[in-house]
Image: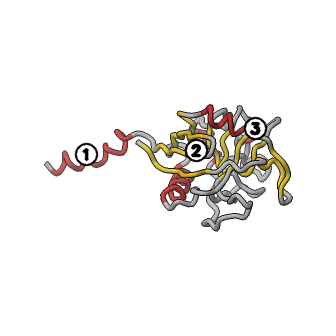
Amino acid sequence: MRKVLFALTLALPLLAGNPKVEIATSLGAFTVELAPEAAPATVQNFLAYVRNGTYNGTIFHRVVRGSITVIQGGQHLPDLSKKNVGASIRNEADLAKAKKLLNTRGTIAMARESLPDSAKAQFFINVKDNPSLNHKARTLGDFGYCPFGKVVKGMDVVERISKVKTSEQKGMKDVPAAPVTIVAVKEVP
């Protein structure tokens, strides 16, 4: 009997499938299915922020259109100040690429600063295929940005956010003229 229970305990995570998160915004909600097999530490980091409520009340502070088209959020508040977040994580863009998860339309990826291992809480959704953001080499300029899941419901909401009017505010470019608030982020079945 113990062996059966142990086997069931090991199988339950596999039966449950990949974790899903609903991101409810002031313009509607969308659902992202995460890919822990492609970016385990990144998914763990993102879920920690989901579970402790860090994303609630933040905004999509960047809407970039052009050769790269993304919506970015997860740390800035409506006044463009930043919430305090944890330490940077290792960039798993190389692992994600090895698992064939790239910065294609609908994927969620970690935003970061110029150093490859500088991602913390901010994420972006690729509104179109953005191959220039993919991992190419283990160098400073070519490490890429780590995708860690994909929008599985509500891509129309992502598109709506990507079309809002933007302006320059407090020295930041591509800021939505009217805040697009992340009302709540929660795990869903």
Cα separation, mark 2 vs mark 3, equals 17 Å
Instruction: Mark 3 or mark 1: name the one nearer the start of the chain.
Output: 1
Rendered residue at 59%/35% (across/down): 100
Q: Which residue is mark 2?
A: 148
Rendered residue at 61%/51% (across/down): 182
Q: Which residue is mark 3?
A: 69
Q: Quadrant of residue 103?
A: top right
Q: Which residue is mark 1?
A: 7
**Residue 160, x across and y down, in percent:** 68, 35
Viewer-closest of 90 and 128: 128
Q: Quadrant of residue 161?
A: top right
The image shows residue 146, relative to residue 118, as above or below, that is above
Identify the amino acid type marked 1.
Answer: Ala
Identify the secondary structure beneath mark 3.
loop
Mark 3, residues whose alpha carbon is within 10 Å: few (<14), some, or many (≥20)? some
The image shows residue 35, relative to residue 112, as above or below, that is above
Mark nearer the viewer, 1 or 2: 2
The image shows residue 114, relative to residue 130, as above or below, that is below
**Residue 53, x across and y down, in percent:** 52, 59
